[in-house]
Amino acid sequence: MGMDQEEEERRMASLLAARRALRAGVDKSRALSRALAREGSRLEEIQTRLQVMEAAVRPIRAPREALAAAGPNIDRAVGPAAAVLKVFDAVHGLEPPLLARAAVSEDLPGYLAVLARLEEALHFLSDNCGLAAQWLADIVAYLGERKLADSRFVSDLAEALEQLKSTSADLDGGLLGAVLEMLEAEFRRVLAEHSAPLAMKEPDNSDPASIAPSRIPVAAVHKLSLILDRLAANGRLDHCSAAYADARGDTVSASLRALGLDYLKETTEDAQALSPSVELWGRHLEFAVHHLLEVERKLCVAVFERRPEAASLCFAEIAARAGILDFLKFGRAVADARKDPIKLLRLLDVFDSLNKLRLDFNRLFGGKACVEIQSRTRELVKRVVDGAVEIFEELLVQVELQRNMPPPVDGGVPRLVSFVAKYCNQLLGEQYWSVLTQVITIHRSWRKEVFNDKMLVDAVLNIVKTLEANFDTWSKAYEDVTLSYLFMMNIHWHFFKHLKGTKLGGLLGDAWLREHEQYKDYYSAVFLRESWGTLAPLLSREGLILFSKGRATARDLVKQRLKSFNANFDEMYQKQSTWVISDRDLQQNTCHLVVQAIVPVYRSFMQNYGPLVEQDISASKYVKYSAEDLDKMLNTLFLPKPGKPRRAGSFQITHSNEKITSAMTGLHRSASTLK
């Protein structure tokens, strides 16, 4: 009897111990439920499931030994769950400082330190929350397998734990997402505060003071970099890059638009019409690269300090938004314009601008992110080089084609002559010579051919000498041989005067120039002899000496000679009044020689024999001019007529494999716009 009582007491003691262990587990479960409940509405579902789990544990119908064995297992499972709850409490405590918007802008380092604690807590929860839930699930399975609890409650508890595990992805209830949104907003605010467009003026690339500064203080750059690091660490680098590219790209674009870049959208095939814009294009492109995009590149590197690849991608987007591709598109428009000699100069301008910026382009746009800019630039350079060489190589042929064109009807200097002289001097000048040499050298290197300066000089001189060979052909086209003399006098003097002292004249040589001066003197003498020189003999004194055959006879001879002189003078004056001597000095000198050939002879004749007819009733028929009248009339000869078109002076470059349909278009515009 005593033994049975002792045995019963031991069983009760064991049962009470199991009960206490189970109660302790239940208490801990309740604590877990209360902690999760404090997380608010986002954890209501978790609390409900824990209540189900608590209810499931109550109806325990098991032997005391089994319950005693279950106690340690329950303790091991509930312990980690309690630790997780403590971290949840810590996360909840971080909400007030993290959701205080003023803290982001006023104390960013302190704010980021709090954020680091949140990230650490979430990392712990991410690693342990699922594990704790799994241990609890294992205990539930343990209870179910050993039938230590009602099967219905075990099943409900297992289902609740599965749902608990499925909600573990949102461990902070959206707190981290809200914090990151606040950081993004601050990132945009700092950018907006320091991204106002520049108050631009026409750039002066030679003035270092005109270089645009960074415009974002070092402190702001540091702040942007800190924010970007945290956002990037949380998978929001793309958001930062897009925001940065939007702000800075729009700023650079607005700054450039203030310069007036509407010309970049010009659509015309006329290279001459594009000429003023090409000069602006070169200045604006250099300014954009050196003083805007260079600054933006440095800013990108500073802000994206630890992420060079992201910095390159962001800068490429900024450059695109700034309109760098529009600059290249304009250069392409020049390359695609209709071919004429002026286009060659514009192509050389474009190449020169791109070549000056070559190292800058390689440095700024050399990465993979700028592959489109690289491709467009290479394509533009190739089209510019090919187009420039094609025009230059066809100049000689085009000058030859002008040989069969009619010369100016007034005997003046053809526009072609003036244009080619100026044009070749431009090609030989400092602005274009080295550029043209480089362009042709590059083109020949592509074809694996050799080229040097002497070859280029010879090519330019051949153009001039080919033009010189046109002179005789043009002069023979005149029906009036006297006009051909005037034409040759004009054109040789023009060559001599406009090439003497120039680079082209120096290459042609003094002997070559003196030859043209001598030709001018020769044709001037022939012109005077064959035209105005024929009038003086008409006022011969033969038969009038001493009035050997009587006064009446002398009067008749004077009348006849004056009548003949007047008729020939009027005819010659009327004809030559439409002729032109292009050079003012040559015109005055020629008029002076004409006056000296006629007026003194006429004055002497009238002084000696004029009285014989001046008293005659019909004197006005014979005495039409005084010596002063002739002097004035003759000094007004050969003056250029404003706005009168020139022939033998216009040509258009065409593709070598095309039929030339018009050799009379283009150069009259070229001659008027050549600078």
Image (cartoon, rainbow, N blue to C red):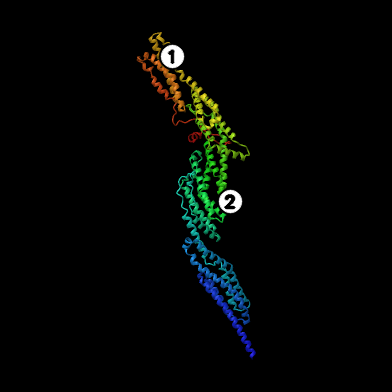
Q: Is residue 233 visible?
A: yes
Numbered circle sitting on residue 222: none
Q: Name the spot of residue 491 as percent of width and height, x first.
A: 50, 27
Nearer the observer, 309 or 343:
309
> Image point 53% across, 53% down: which residue?
300
Label 2 packing within 10 angstroms: few (<14), some (14-19), many (20+)? few
For marks 2 and 1, the one nearer the N-term is 2
Helix, strand or loop at label 2? It is: helix
Q: Amino acid at mark 2?
A: Lys
Distance from the alpha carbon under mark 2 to that under mark 1: 93 Å
Q: Amino acid at mark 1?
A: Ser
> Image point 44% across, 31% down: which residue?
642
**Quadrant hosting residue 606:** top left
Nearer the observer, 229 or 665:
229
The residue that disc 1 covers is 540
**Quadrant hosting residue 660:** top right
Q: Name the spot of residue 645 as percent of width and height, x first.
A: 47, 31
Establish if 296 lies above or below 36.
above
Numbered circle sitting on residue 368: 2
Q: Is residue 662 visible?
A: no
- Residue at the limit of the structure toward the top, as seen here: 549
- Residue at the limit of the structure toward the bottom, as seen here: 1
Q: Name the spot of residue 514 as percent of width and height, x first.
A: 53, 25
